[in-house]
Amino acid sequence: MDTNKLTIDAERFAAAIIAGNPKQTNEDNKIYIKRQLTLYLESVLLVNDFNSLEENQLGSAKEKQRQAILDKIIEHRYN
């Protein structure tokens, strides 16, 4: 695992989000459960999107580094 890569555990993150979302006064149980479920699912999807973006950005950065090294090698070879 690359130490520079930030990966978030989607389930733990979502659980933390809903844990910090108390039931509002006079809120119907059904509404509260729907709200909690919506928050949980949206949190998981958001984190999965973030993790994919992080992975793709890391790959892109490595590709740029490889290309820069290759460019330097070619530059020195023909100078």
Image (tube, rainbow, N blue to C red):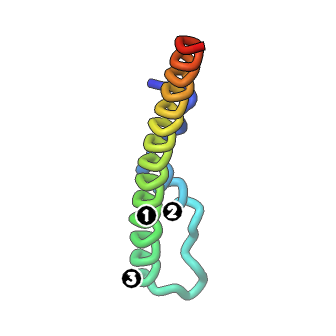
Of marks 1 and 2, which one's residue comes earlier in the chain? 2
- Residue 77, compared with residue 6, is above or below; it is above
Residue extending farthest to the front is 79
Within 10 Å of disc 3 (Cα), the crowding (few <14, some 14-19, many 20+) is few
In the rendering, at what x and y percent does residue 12 appear?
A: 46, 47
- Residue 72, compared with residue 45, is above or below; it is above
Quarter of the picture containing the C terminus is top right
Mark 2: which secondary structure? helix
Separation of residues labelled 1 and 2 (CA atoms): 6 Å
- Front in this rendered view, residue 57 or 68: 68
The residue shown at (39%, 70%) is 37
> Picture quarter containing residue 25?
bottom right
Per the image, the residue denoted by label 1 is 40
Dot 1 and dot 2 residues touching (CB under 8 Å): yes
Foreground tag (3 vs 1): 1
Residue 24: image tag: none
Kindly identify the amino acid type of the residue bearing the numbered disc 3: Lys
Separation of residues labelled 3 and 2 (CA atoms): 15 Å
Kindly identify the amino acid type of the residue bearing the numbered disc 2: Ile
Per the image, the residue denoted by label 3 is 30
The residue shown at (52%, 33%) is 64
Per the image, the residue denoted by label 2 is 18
In the rendering, at what x and y percent does residue 3 appear?
A: 54, 25
Of marks 3 and 1, which one's residue comes earlier in the chain? 3
Foreground tag (1 vs 2): 1
On screen, residue 23 versus residue 10, left or right, reads right
